Amino acid sequence: MSEGPAVAIDGLGKSFNVGFLRRRSKPALTDLRLRVERGEIFGYLGPNGSGKTTTIKLLVGLLHADAGTASILGFPLRSRDWRRRVGFLPENPYLYDYLTAREYLEYVGQLFGLRPPERRRRAGELLEKVGMASAADWPMRRFSKGMLQRVGLAQALVNQPELVFLDEPMSGLDPVGRRLVRDLIVALKAQGCTVFFSTHILPDAEALCDRVALLREGRLVEVGPLSQVLRVDPSHLEVLAAGLGADAVARLPEAAGGRVPVGDRWRLEVAVGQLGTVATAIEREGGRVLSANPARQTLEEAFFREVGEAPPS
Amino acid sequence: MSGGRTGRLLAVALNTFRETVRERVLYNLIVFAIVMILSGLLLGELSIRQEERIIKDVALAAMDFFGTLIAIFMGVGLVSKEIDRRSLYPLLAKPLSRGEFFLGKFAGLGFTLFVNVAVMWVGAMVALLLAGQGPGGLLMLKGVLAIYMGLLLVVALALLFSTLTSSAMATVATVAVVLAGRYSDVVRNMRQVVPGAPGWLVSAAYYVIPNFHNFDFKGRVAYGDPVPAGDLAWVALYAVVYISFLLGLGLHAFKRRDLN
């Protein structure tokens, strides 16, 4: 096995020519510097057009960088040595619709040099894993977007990669499919695989990632562990209370802010000095305090803070 | 795990062949073979002592015409369609290089055309036999081989344009060059029609545009005139050099291209 981080990016930059009559160069990615450690789940976040897909395309060799260098699994980008060890799911993958899912996976197995029995076995295993075994022999032209996404995910895993790049892997999936992908990502990490994924679905990133990077207009604005990116507010506590109806919550003192229902519980935001008052009021209304922790931003709040836009109300 | 450059190239070629078969391109062969057999029977009735010549002429012309259509219209989509649909994105992140993909596509369509021409050749032989003639022998095979080499050259042209532009523009460009190459005499004598045309431009066009006349042995085969092995070897050399040049240019462009 080679040494070094899973991905190391040093000053990567890319511009595209835009305009028809007046051609001009528009930067899509500027001086990106980033390291992704082996074995972590790394979330790559940013609004549309922020450069997420451009970064992934540069890393897998679909685009040529204007500036900077990068290495994958310790190998320089131009080397072909890392390609046997990496999986890639593009955004909204288009797979050959004249093939069945099984044929497609076997074709991908051929490109990795797997022998026929091995690629048949691997295709069957993966189709089972992504919940597509029952549609394995249908032509893919009959597949929905979500089904294609699942097969796309399976093709990224044919070679049992050490590192996978997943560009919007939850895109087009129903809740069952999203859950499946989340479980799959967790299982990959458990097997020692590094997962680099871009997503717009922030709760998924929050639930899965060890570290995240936030990108805005082609520039990296923040990168780090979730605990660092999601800033702790020392002046407030997040109180979780149970046994309260909506009427009872309405009667709580103003010091109990936030007031977000979470299933049959309520999440309240309380100033540190007001905890005693609020706890007493909760007990008076027949409820009980389950926990009180320092308030922390959600990833969504951090995202909007960093990209400089207001969250949707 | 094992497998090398050749294995990956063959995988792409076989998948390209499978695509053409599933897109029903080869169905025209069956229709053509039936038409050939029927026309052989009909011509046997209508013509006196000309059956063999007419059947050979029609068969070779049909092979050339249908083959060129397939070479152009499948060839221009080989790379541009993959880029437009983004179906090559997951593949190029694998050990498959752009060169292997590009040459695999060429080999795949080349194999499709090989099957196409072979089936048509068999159809022509059946028609000759039904008309009470011999199957055509080595002379007919030489004519068929020359047509096949010309078709490979058309594929290389289409593939080059396919890497440079969209399918529609590539179709226009390929058709234009194939037509110019089939009427290369007109290109050479352009100054008689357009006296103001610069001589260097006419000469350059004549020498740069592939001369598809070189691959046309139809008349000699139909009339039973011999086609020396040296003539066929020269045509093969011409095809190899030209195809290599076009594939080299196309590959260079494809390797440099950003896949947005």
Image (cartoon, rainbow, N blue to C red):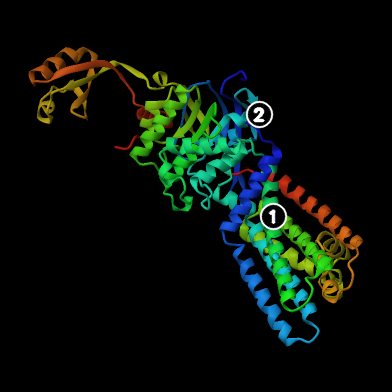
Tell me residue A90's x, y (percent).
Answer: 51, 40
Say what amino acid the circle numbered 2 marks: Asp
Say what amino acid the circle numbered 1 marks: Phe
Tell me residue B107's x, y (percent).
Answer: 70, 51
Left or right, residue A23 beside residue A48 = right
Q: Compare residues B35 and A282 and report the one nearer the observer.
A: B35
Instruction: Please say if the residues under marks 2 and 1 sit with CB atoms less than 8 Å apart.
Output: no
Q: Residue at x 39, y 30 (%)?
A: A183
Q: Residue at x 70, y 65 (%)?
A: B67
A34 lies above or below B161: above
Residue B218 appears in view: yes
> Disc 1 sits on a residue from what chain?
B
Q: Compare residues B200 and B173 and report the one nearer the observer.
A: B173
Left or right, residue B241 beside residue A177 = right
> Disc 2 sits on a residue from what chain?
A
Q: Identify the disc placed on residue A81.
A: 2
Tell me residue B239's x, y (percent).
Answer: 82, 57
Q: Which is in the foreground here, disc 2 or disc 1?
A: 1
Q: Residue at x 52, y 36 (%)?
A: A121
Q: Residues within 10 Å of mark 2 (few under 14, many from 20)?
A: some
User: The C terminus of chain B lies in which quarter of the figure?
Assistant: top right
Q: Residues within 10 Å of mark 1 (few under 14, many from 20)?
A: some
At numbered mark 1, what does the secondary structure look like: helix, strand or loop?
Answer: helix
Residue A62 appears in view: no
A143 lies above or below A6: below
Q: Quadrant of residue B91?
A: top right
Q: How many angstroms separate mark 2 from mark 1 (CA)?
A: 31 Å
Tell me residue A259's x, y (percent).
Answer: 20, 27
> Does label 1 lie on the same chain as label 2?
no
At numbered mark 2, what does the secondary structure look like: helix, strand or loop?
Answer: helix
Q: Identify the disc placed on residue B111.
A: 1
